[in-house]
Image (cartoon, helix red, strand yellow):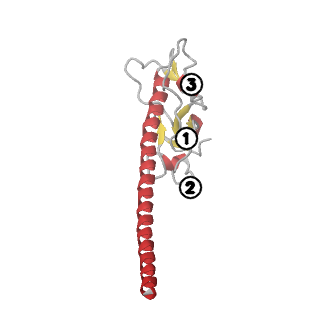
Amino acid sequence: MPDSRRNQSGAVLLLMLFWAAIGMTMLTLTVEVYSESVVRDRKTELLRIGEEFRRGIGSYFFGSPGTVMNLPVRLEDLESDPRMLVITRHVRRIYRDPMTGESKWGVIRLRDVAGWSPPAVLPGMESRTYAADPEGIVGIYSLGWPPDGSTNANADQRIGRGLDEGGPVFAFGIGAPTREPR
């Protein structure tokens, strides 16, 4: 009798190991799906925030007082326009980069762009000119791109590409950068 009991305990152990392996496989698949979901949500948030910054840069440019339109020199200028007598906000706040969790963004300055010219002038604004300050910000990009933590490709490789092809650049009336943004 003791011999049959010893055989059964081995079978139970084998069965428990089998169920543990199935459980670990299910847990791994669940974590993988959750991880993909988090990255997808961050990408969606990045698109929303980047578009907000792009619109903010355009609003800053076209909202310039006087006859000379110019670009912001700091991202904080979009949050509180120093050229205006009353508080003017072109973006609600300096958003956190969803890829890094920080409020630091890569900026593309006018000096980094070959042949930048402002978008078509709006009706009634034909007499206005723009100041070509080389320090003016024409766009932003995420410093945390790509989400897998590999090296960040330079901006001219990202322009016009999608989220899975080097990362998005959010720019106002941009051409192609001539070198890596600072």
- Contact? badges 2 and 3 (CB < 8 Å): no
Question: Going from the N terminus, do you reach mark 1 or mark 2 first?
Answer: 1
Q: Which of marks 2 and 3 is in front?
A: 2
* Separation (CA) of disc 1 from disc 2: 17 Å
The answer to whether marks 1 and 2 mark residues whose Cβ atoms lie closer than 8 Å is: no
Residue sitting farthest toward the left: 123
Does residue 45 appear to the left or right of 132 in the view shown? left
- Compute the Cα span from label 3 to label 1: 21 Å
User: Along the horizontal axis of the image, is 56 left or right of 72?
Assistant: left
Residue on which disc 3 sits: 77
Bin the neighbour count of mark 1 within 10 Å (Cα to Cα): few under 14, some 14-19, many 20 and up.
few
In this orientation, which residue lies closer to the viewer: 175 or 72? Answer: 72
Where residue 168 sits in the image (x, y, percent)?
47, 45
User: Image quarter for residue 1?
Assistant: bottom left
Q: What amino acid type is highlighted by mark number 1?
A: Gly
Q: Give the x, y percent position of residue 44.
A: 41, 42
Q: Is residue 75 above or below residue 16?
A: above
Mark 3 or mark 1: which is in front?
1
Q: Looking at the picture, tell me which residue is in the foreground, 36 or 157.
A: 36
Residue under label 2, please give it: 150
Pointer 1 residue:
101
Q: In which quarter of the image is the C terminus?
A: top right
The numbered disc on residue 179 is none
Place of residue 29 in the rendered image (x, y in percent of width and height, measured from the top left): 41, 61
Q: The residue under label 2 is which amino acid type?
A: Ser
Quarter of image, res 110: top right
